[in-house]
Image (cartoon, rainbow, N blue to C red):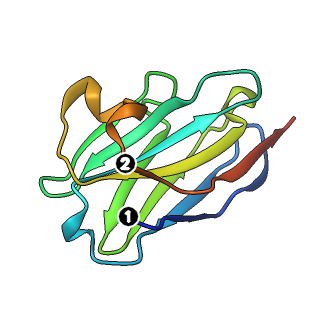
Amino acid sequence: QVQLVESGGGSVQTGGSLRLSCTVPRSTFAVARIAWFRQAPGKEREGVAAIVTGPRIVYYGDAVQGRFTISVDNAKCDLQMNGLKPEDAAMYYCAASRNPEYGSSALRTSTYEDFGQGTQLTISS
């Protein structure tokens, strides 16, 4: 099991930026995919962004396309969030999988084996 630790959450004004980080305690060589999901109160967990670590193929949810950027460097996966909106407020979770799924599967919760505890993002107007 991969132990994932998220950091970087906080409160940001509408239109602001924030970077979340996910630390993977061993080389990402053993992890084929890393993703960020989010869940707001009363809503289902939503796929935000995913990266297939080998070829560096990235996928984004429709709600964040063009505003968020996912990147991975050795044992850390970052989610750069720009142009934040009130609807981006949620608990953000990092997830990892040892299987290189592509396409819509890359943002599907059920295709990930390990999740972190989450980090909270709050948006203020």
Question: The residue tagged with tag 2: helix, strand or loop?
Answer: loop
Q: Are marks 1 and 2 in contact (CB under 8 Å)?
A: yes
Q: Residue at x 43, y 50 (%)?
A: 95
Q: Residue lying furthest left in this view?
A: 55
Q: Position of residue 109 (x, y in %)?
A: 42, 33
Residue 12 placement, left or right of 61: right
Under mark 1, the amino acid is: Gln
Task: Say few, some or many: other residues with alpha carbon within 10 Å of mark 2 (under 14 / 14 to 19 / 20 or more).
Answer: few
Q: Is residue 26 above or below residue 8?
A: below
The image quadrant that residue 26 belongs to is bottom left
Q: Reading the chain from its start, which is encountered first: label 1 or label 2?
A: 1
Q: What residue does disc 2 label?
A: 113
77 or 4, which lies in front? 4
Q: Residue at x 51, y 53 (%)?
A: 80
47 or 25, which lies in front? 25
Q: Position of residue 62 (x, y in %)?
A: 44, 21
Q: Which mark is residue 108?
A: none
Q: Position of residue 84 (x, y in %)?
A: 66, 38
Q: Which mark is residue 1?
A: 1
67 or 109, which lies in front? 109
Q: Position of residue 19 (x, y in %)?
A: 58, 58
Under mark 2, the amino acid is: Glu
Q: Is residue 76 above or below residue 95?
A: below
Quarter holding the N terminus? bottom left
Q: CA distance from mark 1 to mark 2?
A: 8 Å
Residue 58 placement, left or right of 43: left
